[in-house]
Amino acid sequence: MTVANGLEQVIVAETEISFVDGERGRLVFRGRWAKDLSDTHRFEEVAHLLWYGSLPSGEEKADIAAKWASEREISAGVKAVIDAIPREVGMMSVLRTAVSALETEGFGYPPTLEQAASITMKLPTIVAYCYRRLKGLAPVEPRTDLRHTANYLYMLKGEEASPVHVQALEAYLNLMMEHGMNSSTFAARVIASTRSDLISAVVGAIGALKGPLHGGAPSLVMNMLRDIGSKDRAEAWIRSKLENDGRIMGFGHRVYKTKDPRAEALRLIASRLSDSDPCLELAVHVEETAIRLLEEYKPGKKLYTNVEFYAAAVMNAIDFEEELFTPTFVVTRSVGWCAHILEAAAGRLIYPDSAYVGQLPSE
Ligand code: ACO
């Protein structure tokens, strides 16, 4: 029996949702280039594409905007669950617990598109509620007259955000919405394949995304940039990390053997916000240095910038604190998770095998 370590290159499903072309560095959402959608469409439109297979018509756009916006409120019960958690617990753990508490609110089996829209609309409200509580600020209720992204920023900051910040965040959310059979999506699919409910599958996915090798990387990228501090220290810092067998956060990818196309798109978004941002300048220098040194220390491994590297730069440029980085990833990736949960719930139970290498009892 051969073990596919880390399930690398194992094909576990047929899907129509997205295609990650790792060799050529391309990403397709339902037959369209993800990079073309990110800047030109609203969050709601890209979500509609991933869930229904097509961009909404003019009439559908107004319809879903109103219908989905009416799903934004969270109950007093969910708020009470959040309030009961000690403040020192990390945002991702609070978020995971709060989403669990939604189970009592009509999210039972089987998963549906209505449930998918409902949880995706509630997630920003949960994140904003958790964040403002962490900061000792009064909660801000969602508004139905704002679009999804503008409302998320409004609930976080307590005032309407600038159109430039809304556009940058929207482009980030659209790009990050879906990405093939990544670890959190696979976790969600495994749970959905058991005919469990949508909330359980999303909770499992949040647990997987939280890890530093997956969605937990951007705050570690910020730590790294802060630690490096200035361009002249980058080379020595990275060398020392690699010589001690450390990982450079924001580099390397299971599927991409070239630059992650989302990384370049995010770099452009960050530079549009401020092309003289010292943090971005440092990031660009660290990127060049890290790619060169990774090739020196890990020859032939094809380790390039992944999406998380410039995700940190975009988040920083729109004044998001690090506590919000991974929760904001959840806010958007829930769209992809839900699309996959619906696909997997209609499929066969996922139940792989393992090779037992322990001892056998004597006969
Ligand atoms: N820094 C240094 N070395 C690395 C890095 C890195 N960032 N990434 C991979 N390598 C090396 C490994 O040490 C290993 O070397 P070896 O064969 O000499 O032991 C080799 O490259 C292969 O590494 P694996 O861990 O087998 O690669 P895998 O495909 O499993 O890992 C992963 C992919 C987890 C993303 C990895 O590249 C990594 O840890 N990156 C840093 C964390 C990160 O940025 N995560 C975000 C990913 S994007 C996302 O999930 C949204």
Image (tube, grey):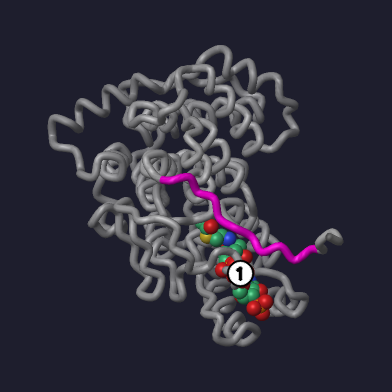
Residue 345 in picture, x, y percent from top left: 41, 39
Quadrant in which the C terminus is drawn:
bottom right
**Residue 169 visible in the current orientation:** no
Given residues 353 and 143, the one toward you in this image is 353
**Residue 307 visible in the current orientation:** yes
At 27% from the left edge and 23% from the top edge, which residue is drawn? Answer: 66
Quadrant in which the N terminus is drawn:
bottom right
For label 1, the residue is 3
Given residues 119 and 124, the one toward you in this image is 119
At 62% from the left edge and 42% from the top edge, which residue is drawn? Answer: 323
Chain part drawn in magenta:
348-358
Residue 161: image quadrant is top left
At 72% from the left edge and 34% from the top edge, which residue is drawn? Answer: 89
Query: Magenta stretch containing residue 355, yes or no?
Result: yes
Residue 102 in picture, x, y percent from top left: 53, 22
Q: Is residue 138 left or right of residue 86?
A: left
Residue 335 in picture, x, y percent from top left: 39, 41
